[in-house]
Amino acid sequence: MQETAVTVDPNITDPAESTSAAQETSAPDATGHRVGVAVVGLGGAVASTMVAGVELLRLGAVGSAGLPFADRTELTPYESLRFGGWDLDPADLAKAAQVHQVLEPAQLDLVAGHLETLTPWPAVADPRWCRNAGGANVVEISSLRERIARIRDDLQRFRTEQELDTVVVLNLASTEAVPPDTTFLADAAALERAIDADDPAVTPGVLYAYAAISETCPYVNFTPGAGAESPALQHLAEQHGVPIAGRDGKTGQTMLKTVLAPALRSRGLHVDGWYSTNLLGNRDGEILNDPDSMASKVNTKGSVLDSMLGYAVDDHIVRIDYYRPRGDAKESWDNIDLTGFLGGRMQLKLDFLCRDSVLAAPLVLELVRMVVEAHRRGESGAQEQLGYFFKSPVTRDSRPPEHGFARQEQTLNDWLDGR
């Protein structure tokens, strides 16, 4: 497996320097705007990698590889972002990063001082929807309204203490099971009634989204959990003038699928079957060992192919297997059976040896910058142009989303250019 390259400036030798640099992040961006990121799942592998990555960028210890919109200097600079958030584990981010083992030792040494200053806030959680995720750092409040109020209080405190103009709420939590009955998400009134009735079908992910929108915070759902795509939360976001985006980040295997499938279709090659499997051993993989959480993830991974090809692939199989020795070093393997001219049978095999959090962390940073820009432009509701980042993109009025990667990229660039 190819190792991640490590670039460390030899002139930076004292990890304490990263702490002093972190204290400068309260400075606004070039427009005088102060942006904070409140992360659901702050202690996770993706979030700790993201925060460490921003600190390494600030120190000049790494370049912009993996950041697809680094050249868009009109967007909020990565280095000006401030971070906070919730997690079931109360450990500071230095300890979290050490556990996840995504960063190289030299990188962790440089940023440990800064990561130690970031400790997650107590989280709103419900083990019914994420059975393999546990921790003691939990808000002990029973009422759904009280839980929402607690989240809103955290956001208000974060905004005030850090003197922020905009706070983005970014959901990087472990995969929740999808409720068997989601009629409470059909419209805003139904959602309000469900919250008032303490309906057990209302998941923590929905509560975070509701609280974020109520606090006029742009909201990004990078998880497969239900919520941001619903008419109820879209309507609420439009009422509050808040942009929202989701669902389920498109990082590795599905990204390649959305590149390959349109190409195969354009050549007239018929896809008879597509077998996709994943091996991963990080906390996300452990969570997905639960069948209900797994079903939520497989649904978003498996939903893209038929729409791109224009026909149903009966033998489209998607598997995700937890294999602890892999840690964050994931392997995704695809076998594609094709029929071409004269009935000729062919196969395409693809093996992607990747780093799960190294792929995801830069994308969530770009998403933060994008929704801040959408908010600056006065846009609200579902941000369809951000489908580029997701397996199951949120659209307005439940329209079928575009999944083809090239078209998604063009749509996003057109929006950035004001076209």
Image (spheres, rainbow, N blue to C red):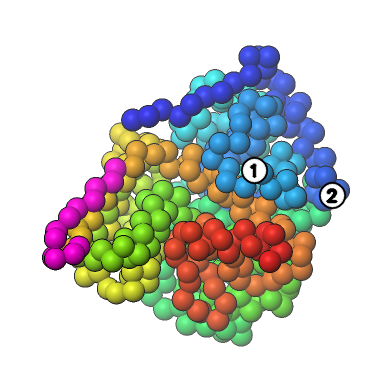
Vertical placement of residue 373 versus 197, above or below? above
Image x and y of residue 412, in percent:
60, 61
Quarter of the rendering occupied by the N terminus: top left
Viewer-side residue, 416 vs 28? 416
Q: Which residue carries the number 1 mark?
A: 70
Q: Which residue carries the number 2 mark?
A: 31
Vertical placement of residue 98 versus 152, above or below? above
Image x and y of residue 115, in percent:
63, 32
Which callout, 2 or 1, points at the residue further toward the start of the chain?
2
Q: Residue at x 53, y 52 (%)?
A: 172
* Residue 404 numbered mark, or none: none
The local crowd at label 2, few if under 14, some if 14 to 19, many if 20 or more residues have their Cα within 10 Å, is few
Image x and y of residue 218, in percent:
68, 62
| Magenta span contains residue 227 | no
Image x and y of residue 241, in percent:
73, 72
Q: Residue at x 52, y 33 (%)?
A: 97
Q: Residue at x 73, y 46 (%)?
A: 73
Q: Which residues are magenta?
A: 340-351
Q: Residue at x 83, y 45 (%)?
A: 30
Quarter of the rendering occupied by the C terminus: bottom right
The local crowd at label 1, few if under 14, some if 14 to 19, many if 20 or more residues have their Cα within 10 Å, is some
Vertical placement of residue 314 versus 337, above or below? below
In the image, what residue type sits under mark 1? Ala
Residue that lies at the very extreme toward the right in this rendered image: 32
| Magenta span contains residue 346 | yes
